[in-house]
Amino acid sequence: MEITFYKYQGTGNDFIMIDNRQETFSKNDTKLIAKLCDRRFGIGADGLILLENDAETDFKMVYYNSDGNQSSMCGNGGRCLVAFAKQLGVIENKTTFIATDGLHHATISENGIVSLQMKDVDAVKIEEDYIFLDTGSPHHVQLVEDLKNYPIKEKGAEIRYGNLYGQAGSNVNFVHQNDTDTFSVRTYERGVEDETLSCGTGVTAVAIAMKATGRTNSDTIKLNVEGGKLEVSFIEKDGKYTDVFLKGPATFVFEGTVAV
């Protein structure tokens, strides 16, 4: 059987997109999903996303990490899925869709910039040398010196697999402050088990963490990632963060077919 797929990337975070509105894709075949995401033996991607029908919204997002396992929310993947939905003609310039962490609203501009509403954040755990919060996926946030040369994979794996987060683990973000409202971020992603060029839920977590710890007074934060630039905005009141939006490019790369 041949499957038609579409490749998208959002600031270097890349995804295989499949239109599964007819429910033809085998959703429980972990080995197949991992093979398709493999950069040597498959198409190559940080994750695979299915666009499916939903009775109450424009579509449903089903997200798999590159290890083949269904996972929690992916911000850049959600933005790319919005662009994919527009390419398919499912939506025009605005949408509401459902994902594993609930309802999302989004808009897409003519030049492919997608603004995606993320989940509200009610709790930020601030420790002496790190911050932890859930932005649809769990995130450890830690400021470091010399981010450019920091051993992201090694140190990220230590934290992800360490005693702090147990078997479930956490994504790990290493951060450097550039100025009052701009931060550079490198992320180790669980499920990929390596550094990715960008992580949408990760930069969202960093932006909120930097506000929560008083390192910025801004409600609109610029994030420099290895694959480009993103922006996160929110409304903060009494330690609660609402109207959280992740904004950045979502780019179509190519379309193809693969035999499975």
Image: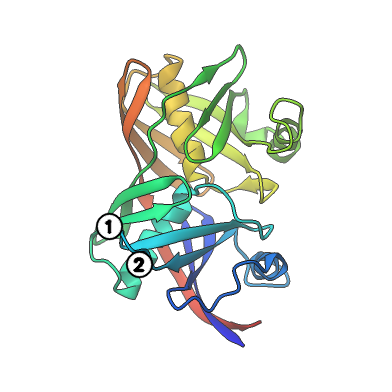
| Residue at 43 percent of width and 67 percent of height | 52
Q: How is the image coloured?
A: rainbow
The residue that label 1 is drawn on is 95
Identify residue type, mark 1. Answer: Thr
Which of the image's four quarters has the N terminus?
Answer: bottom right
49 and 109: which is toward the camera? 49
Residue furthest out toward the front: 55
For disc 2, the neighbor class at 10 Å (few under 14, some 14 to 19, many from 20) is some
- Residue 42 percent location from the top left of the image: 67, 72
* Callouts 1 and 2 close, C-beta under 8 Å: yes
For disc 1, the neighbor class at 10 Å (few under 14, some 14 to 19, many from 20) is some
The residue that label 2 is drawn on is 85
| Residue at 54 percent of width and 45 percent of height | 226
8 and 222: which is toward the camera? 8
Query: Which structural element holds mark 1?
Result: strand
Q: Is residue 172 left or right of residue 202?
A: right
**Which circle's residue, 1 or 2, is located before the other in the chain?**
2
163 and 205: which is toward the camera? 163
Residue furthest out toward the bottom: 1
Query: Which structural element holds mark 2?
Result: helix
Identify residue type, mark 2. Answer: Ala
- Residue 71 percent location from the top left of the image: 58, 51
What distance separates the C-alpha of mark 1 from that of mark 2?
A: 9 Å
Examine the image and state in which quarter residue 237 appears: top left
251 and 68: which is toward the camera? 68
Vertical order, 29 against 255 (above or below): above
Examine the image and state in which quarter residue 138 appears: top right
Which of the image's four quarters has the C terminus?
Answer: bottom right
- Residue 39 percent location from the top left of the image: 68, 66
Vertical order, 140 against 101 (above or below): above
- Residue 38 percent location from the top left of the image: 69, 65
